Image (tube, helix red, strand yellow):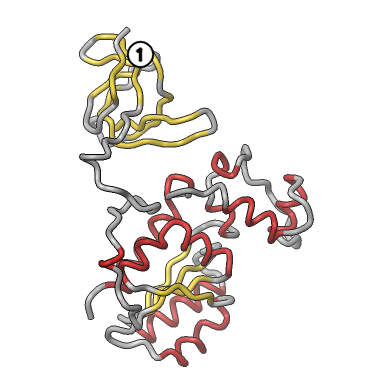
Amino acid sequence: MPTVDAEAGLVVECARTGWCGSVVGWQKGPDGWAVILEDRHGARRPFALGPSFLVDGRLVDLRRPQPSVAATPARSASGSIAVGVSRARVARESRIWVEGRHDAELVETVWGHDLRVEGVVVEELGGVDVLPQRLRDFRPADGRRVGVLVDHWIPGSKEHRIATDVMREWTPHVLVVGHPFVDIWQAIKPASAGIESWPTVPVGTSWKAGVCAALGWGDSAGAAWQALRSRVSDYTDLEPDLLGRVEELIDFVSAPP
């Protein structure tokens, strides 16, 4: 049986399900890599690699192609094209604010290269409640923008109302976006974290403490976080709902005045 590299754009058919589509990406799971196929209607599905695909009517063993060092530009952990240190910028006046230290460290792990190239500094906010005063102290303006990333973004919540009010007051210099996860830990894919799924923590229990107890990670959330963070190597380890929001903030604060 011939082995075929699943290059982007290659049209293949899953012999088991009959799904036919072109190769548009990859997804890392607990059992290895899966190829993502997009059909002619734009629908996408992941399929485990192996000898179960048809290409031009032939049964083939589909595999993930190895990148060519000579032909493929180096990529940063965020998936962007890595550039030399000579392209790094002096820090802009604009800032990205995140709620806590773990948020800042995860952003640095994946987007650190991009942030240095763009000259963007990430700072801890410490909670959405302090956002109005922090903005009054910072005084956003042209060339001095603020992008804010909020955990557990729920329309109608107190945090959502605060964000709406400050964006109305400071338009167009402030952008607040949020992700749906209770905590930034949950934005790491379970497979990358080495677990089947993130546990449900009872209301009234500290989420991190509840997770550590449920998963047997010990009593130190700090130690658990360091072990968890070490399992994140690039953007493929994170949920798309976080990826899109961080990219949006970087684009916002690095845009020309």
Q: Residue at x 75, y 60 (%)?
A: 205
| 247 sits left or right of 234 in the view | left
Establish if 9 lies above or below 149. above
Question: Picture coordinates of residue 116 (x, y %)?
Answer: 36, 68
Secondary structure category for the residue under label 1: loop
Seen as rendered, the residue at the extreme top is 1
Question: Picture coordinates of residue 168 (x, y %)?
Answer: 38, 82
Viewer-nearest residue: 155 or 227: 227
Q: Amino acid at mark 1?
A: Ala
Quadrant of the snapshot with the C terminus: bottom left
Viewer-nearest residue: 209 or 159: 209
Q: Residue at x 38, y 13 (%)?
A: 51
Viewer-nearest residue: 71 or 134: 71
Establish if 137 lies above or below 166. below
User: Which residue is under mark 1?
Assistant: 15
Establish if 199 lies above or below 158. above
| 225 sits left or right of 249 in the view | right
Q: State how many labels appear.
A: 1
Question: Picture coordinates of residue 97 (x, y %)?
Answer: 47, 74
Rendered image quadrant of residue 61:
top left
Question: Picture coordinates of residue 112 (x, y %)?
Answer: 41, 62
